[in-house]
Amino acid sequence: MVHNKAPLSLTVDLQKMAQLDLEHDPQSTPRLFEVNKLYKSFVSLFVALRSFKKFVPIQIIANIINNGKEAILELKSTNVTIIFQDIESFTSLSEEMDPLQLALLTGEYMEVMTEILCSQGGTIDKYIGDCIMTLFNVPTEVADHALAATKAAISCLQVLQEKNKKWKHQYGKELNCRIGIHTGEALVGNMGSVHRMNYTAIGDNVNVAARLEGINKHYGTRLIVSKAVFSSFPKDTFLARKLSKVRVSGKQTATAIYEISPEFEVNTVEVFNFYEGGLKAFKRRDFSVAQEWIQKGLNIDPTDQPSIRLLQRINDTAASTLLGDWSYIEDLTK
């Protein structure tokens, strides 16, 4: 009876490992010599695989196992949503904090943000310093992936606000982040060499997502999405405003960009509405009306950075005598 029970336990363990159930711990060591040797090899493999999933997203490992084929260098065009998320003023933070404390704080931040992004269906592509690049809809399909990515980003901002209370007390610092989201076709798959590969996405749409993250700095915002993302979910799903129409570095065509707010506060709704009214008036060159709209928003929130920026742009344009080739499209080189 004892001899029969041990192999049964090992079989169960192997089946669980094949299903990537790596939270399951191996059972007691079998008594039979050969089975015991097999079991020790299994435990070593179990530990290695559990560690391996910390370097490679579990979705990618599962995809390899389900295909039953060895991974090869391969890229294919796929509709994907890409998130770039970066810690604000990380360089300054590095200069101000003790390196060990900074490492602990950054580690906690990455852990929390990663858990949120993955729980919403995202796959972490890579960590680039303090930046997190996340893919939605690959390697596993995600329904309404642009919507799922936006919800995940909002959750990141909301949870970050709560975590900052703890971090302020523990580390004497708070973290803010900037997020850019874009959706479109990208080449997705394994890149590198036969010796070492990296599952990733490349292409123009990936670059746009990265640019959107950086554009937050120009507007003093935290979450910017492209028109492709904004138009993919129902109207009024989120509190949002059209910020502008911009041409980013390396792009010939301009794209509309939108700020998404993590909360539906009355004052924020009013500021957003006044801003969009001012932007529309600015586009049709009705500068006095545009100034009035933006000033109404600033009367509610004098610190609203996009309104401050747009009002300055309206004033500069209204004072200019060179409007022949004027366009409200902004050229942003970074």
Image: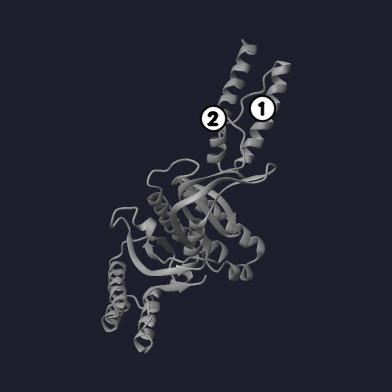
Q: Tell me the residue at 44%/53% (across/down).
A: 184
Return the residue at label 1.
42
**Label 2: which secondary element:** loop
Q: Position of residue 53 (x, y in %)?
A: 60, 41
Foreground disc of the pair 1, 2: 2
From the image, tell me which residue sits under label 2. Answer: 19
Residue 204 in the image: x percent, y percent? 50, 58
Q: Position of residue 320 (x, y in %)?
A: 38, 88
Give the amino acid type for the residue marked by disc 2 in the picture. Answer: Gln
Q: Determine crowd level at label 1: few under 14, some 14-19, many 20+ residues with C-alpha closer than 10 A.
A: some
Q: Which residue is painted at 68% across and 41% down in the image?
A: 194
Disc 2 crowd rating (10 Å Cα; few below 14, some 14-19, many 20+) is few
Coordinates of residue 114 in the picture (x, y in percent): 52, 50
Which of the labelled discs sits on residue 231, or is there none? none
Residue type at numbered disc 1: Phe
Examine the rendered structure and indicate whether residue 318 appears above or below residue 117.
below
Of residue 299 and residue 30, the one placed in the foreground of this image is 299
Left or right of residue 194: residue 83: left
Q: Is residue 197 shown left or right of residue 34?
A: left
Residue most extreme to the top: 1
Tell me what residue is drawn at x 40 percent, y 49 percent. 148
